[in-house]
Image: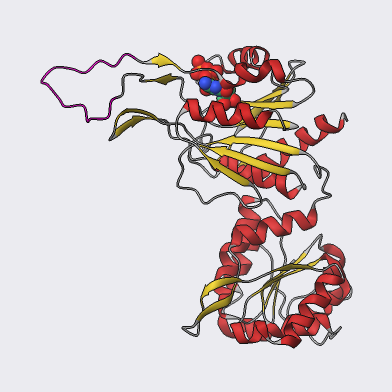
Amino acid sequence: MLGITGGIAIYKSASLLRELTFEHGADVQVIMTDSALKFMSPLIFETFSGKPVWTSMFSDKEMVGVRHVEISKWADAVLISPATANIIGKAANGIADDLLSTVISGAGTKTIFAAAMETGMYENPIMQQNIKRLKDAGFGFIDPESGPLASGESGVGRLAESRVIVHSLLTHLKSGRLRGKKILVSAGPTREWIDPVRFISNPSTGRMGFSLAEAASAEGADVIVISGPTEVASPVGAELIKVSTAEEMKNAIVEKFAESDALVMSAAVGDYTYPEAGSEKLKKNGSDLRLNLKRTDDILKAISGDKGDKVIVGFSVETENIIENSKLKLHEKSMDFIVVNNPKENGAAFGHDTNKVSIIDRKGSVEELELMSKGELSTLIIDKVSKLLSGS
Ligand code: CTP
């Protein structure tokens, strides 16, 4: 249940809702307060949620049963974003005088507040007491960030970024079954320089790896991400180590693997490097250019001797003999399971928000999955890793 109150940060609620439904496959009902309705029409939220938006305790759309009770029972989580000083004050003091505050009162600690307000309101000692009271009672609370505010001032009070809100929500929802586990994730492409201004690389964006890292962190794991160069925002809840070449990635993984419980190897590691790269730009000389490329080390093969009971998940990109080639990689590289991409499928692999994969395990069973968002796929993969780590 997404509760929307009347603050200027409300404009971010539309993309937040879209992220919850499209990226994470969530089933979302929306409640807007009277003040929220002064800022935005419910239509956009009805469109993204595919459901009527609830705006009042008694009138508008029909619902069988007691509306506020039905909604608070139905929801796995109640996310209030943006959460104004008013709704925080009401919730902290047990006031239930409209639909949203009454739903919060029934949902209790299933509720998470993503606060947004002017710095003065946020720093007001009464507000700080209210926030402390909610946190102490077990409610979720996402602190606002610092930056420019609607008033033109700059200070603490800005709504946290959507990805931070979604990550807190997922963490609040999960059981924390990876608590105490260390998960290493590799992500993105690698770059092999041929001179100071040109390199060989691939179209990996790092999005799949970052999404996997966030899913593992939401389950309570300590997550380290080793990523090649990417434009995508850093993963929430994980330590990020940036590398560039395949060799740098190998060195970082070898070092961190020793202290990890699992490695999810989603990086698209370059298979060839150009050892003769110099410090000056290669100039054209009228004839064709031939580069003598050398094989890079295979990272999974380099660490397979230290596997022990650690879990290793690999990825495979193939365009032909997809399943047979992937099964070979699974065994050669000591993986527990392999996630197989076919970049020729619509919406799959590099650069998309979605992915269509098959998962093959060591017994050779092949699970063909539907097209799904990278967020949903990450949850599914991390779920498998948790099961393997717990031996279930
Ligand atoms: N991988 C690795 N080290 C490399 C290359 C790949 O550890 N130097 C990992 C990838 O991160 C992935 C798996 O091996 O988890 C399979 O990668 P893929 O590119 O599909 O296959 P390759 O083994 O490189 O074989 P090929 O490119 O010939 O298909």
Residue under the point 29% across and 33% down: 196
Residue 27 visible in the displayed image? no
- Residue 288 drawn at (x, y percent): 18, 17
Q: Quadrant of residue 136?
A: bottom right
Residue under the point 68% across and 13% down: 331
Of residues 52 and 349, the one drawn nearer to the viewer in this rendering:
349
Left or right: 104, with 166 as reference point: right
Q: Quadrant of residue 178?
A: top right
Report the magenta stretch's main SS: loop
Question: Is 280 contained in the magenta span?
Answer: yes
- Residue 352 drawn at (x, y percent): 51, 42
Q: Is residue 201 above or below residue 158?
A: above
Left or right: 195, with 173 as reference point: left
Of residues 348 and 49, the one drawn nearer to the viewer in this rendering:
348
Residue 158 visible in the displayed image? yes
Left or right: 337, with 190 as reference point: right
Give the number of marks: 0
Q: Ligand 1 quadrant? A: top right
The residues colored magenta run 278-292
Residue under the point 36% across and 19% down: 275
Q: Is residue 254 above or below residue 242?
A: above
Question: Is 190 contained in the magenta span?
Answer: no
